[in-house]
Image (tube, grey):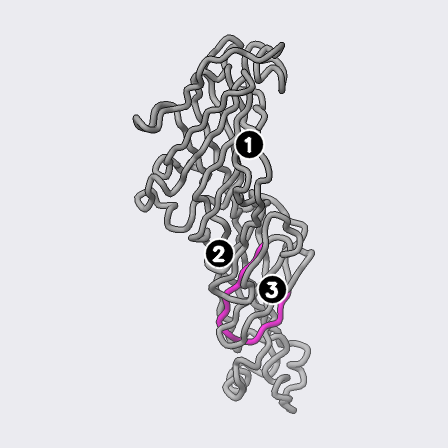
């Protein structure tokens, strides 16, 4: 979306338009102002931004700017794809950027790391993305959107007043959105009082965002799940809930439509150590069709009953507590007290 403002030329509109037929539109530089509205959908002002323009005939150009509200660019007349994203590529730690000079492949991709300890030692996980906002749109710059005047570019000797007075400015308005989504996983646990620690993972989440296309990648990775929040009503409860919220790019492109998913597209795994210090229990669930989108666009997964006979909800066996520990949760994060939320160790 763009608006066009102009200051009239003293040479006369008819003479101006007649001269415009004599030049190659692709040789005309236009004064292009891009105004960026970060607050409406992204919800924050970044400390900098990157802008790429992909010209159909004039190629790829980019600008880095500390002014995140507006930037003036000078581009040839052409058809463009305009891509804006927060900060600069070097400022992200969880992400790297690929093919930024390609109008179809430009992407922000999650970095990965290998787990070096615990039950999942040797597994490769993807990081949670930092906050990032972006927009992509199209813009057509015509020969009439000129910075100085066509008569100046043609060195038209009879039109000197046009040098100072004839300016046409294209104003393009960009509306970046937040690319990241929160994914909340909530699981009911029978025998939660016997849990000393819990760690998990979930597969099948998008491993990046196609910046130039405006959607998540089709490829996926696995996210580690630790530091769960455990909740019981009172300190004597055997049953309770564990909850974990992570930041993601959501489900891969295409799987955001529920009918396109298979159960095994997303596999949730949980690994518990119990309070006796020696018993471990693990569970695996195919949850692709159980993931829902909330009204605000975030994801949620709730397991509060058996999924199937082969996939029962977690039911931890009763074990004797080890040594002087009052309980696994107590020994690591304080008393349950009268209930409430505590962080379970990994």
Q: Give the residue number, with chain letter if any, for mark 1.
A: 226
Q: Report the magenta residues as a range.
A: 72-85
**Residue drawn 54% across the image and 27% down it:** 228
64 horizontally vs 119: left or right:
right
Whole-angstrom CA distance, mark 3 to mark 2, is: 25 Å
Q: Give the residue number, with chain letter if any, for mark 2.
A: 210
Q: Are marks 3 and 1 in contact (CB under 8 Å)?
A: no
Q: Are marks 3 and 2 in contact (CB under 8 Å)?
A: no
**Residue drawn 64% across the image and 77% down it:** 148
**Residue drawn 52% across the image and 55% down it:** 135
Task: Give the class, few, some or many, for how many residues have Cα within 10 Å of label 3's Cα (few <14, many ≥20).
Answer: some
Whole-angstrom CA distance, mark 1 to mark 2, is: 28 Å
Q: Nearer the viewer, mark 3 or mark 1?
A: 1
From the viewer's side, name the closer residue of 18 and 179.
Answer: 179
Whole-angstrom CA distance, mark 3 to mark 1, is: 46 Å
Mark found first going from the N terminus, 3 or 1: 3
From the viewer's side, name the closer residue of 324 and 158.
Answer: 324
Q: Are marks 1 and 2 in contact (CB under 8 Å)?
A: no
Q: Give the residue number, with chain letter if any, for mark 3.
A: 33
Q: Nearer the viewer, mark 3 or mark 2?
A: 2
| Element type where label 1 sits in the image | loop
| Element type where label 2 sits in the image | strand
Please tell me whether residue 280 belongs to the stretch shown in magenta.
no
């Amino acid at each position: 979306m763009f608006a066009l403002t102009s200051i009239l030329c003293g040479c006369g509109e008819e003479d101006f338009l007649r001269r415009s037929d004599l030049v190659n539109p692709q040789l005309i530089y236009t004064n292009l102002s891009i105004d960026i509205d970060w607050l409406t959908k992204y919800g924050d002002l970044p400390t900098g931004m990157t802008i790429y323009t992909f010209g159909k005939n004039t190629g790829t150009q980019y600008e880095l700017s500390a002014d995140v509200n507006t930037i003036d660019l000078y581009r040839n007349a052409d058809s463009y794809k305009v891509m804006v994203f927060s900060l600069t590529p070097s400022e992200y730690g969880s992400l790297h950027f690929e093919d930024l000079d390609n109008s179809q492949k430009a992407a922000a991709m999650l970095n990965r790391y290998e787990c070096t300890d615990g039950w999942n030692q040797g597994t490769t996980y993807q990081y949670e993305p930092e906050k990032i906002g972006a927009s992509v749109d199209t813009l057509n710059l015509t020969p009439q959107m000129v910075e100085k005047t066509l008569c100046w570019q043609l060195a038209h000797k009879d039109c000197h007043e046009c040098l100072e007075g004839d300016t046409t400015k294209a104003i393009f308005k960009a509306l970046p959105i937040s690319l990241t989504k929160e994914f909340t996983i909530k699981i009911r646990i029978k025998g939660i009082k016997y849990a000393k620690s819990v760690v998990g993972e979930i597969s099948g989440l998008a491993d990046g965002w196609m910046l130039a296309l405006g959607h998540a990648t089709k490829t996926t990775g696995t996210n580690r799940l630790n530091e769960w929040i455990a909740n019981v009503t009172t300190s004597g409860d055997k049953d309770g809930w564990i909850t974990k919220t992570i930041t993601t790019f959501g489900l891969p492109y295409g799987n955001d439509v529920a009918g396109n998913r298979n159960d095994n597209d997303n596999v949730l795994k949980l690994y518990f150590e119990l309070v006796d210090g020696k018993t471990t229990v693990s569970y695996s669930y195919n949850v692709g069709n159980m993931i829902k989108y909330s009204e605000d666009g975030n994801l949620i997964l709730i397991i509060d009953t058996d999924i199937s006979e082969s996939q029962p909800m977690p039911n931890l066996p009763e074990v004797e507590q080890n040594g002087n520990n009052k309980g696994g949760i107590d020994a690591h994060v304080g008393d349950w007290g009268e209930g409430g939320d505590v962080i379970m160790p990994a």
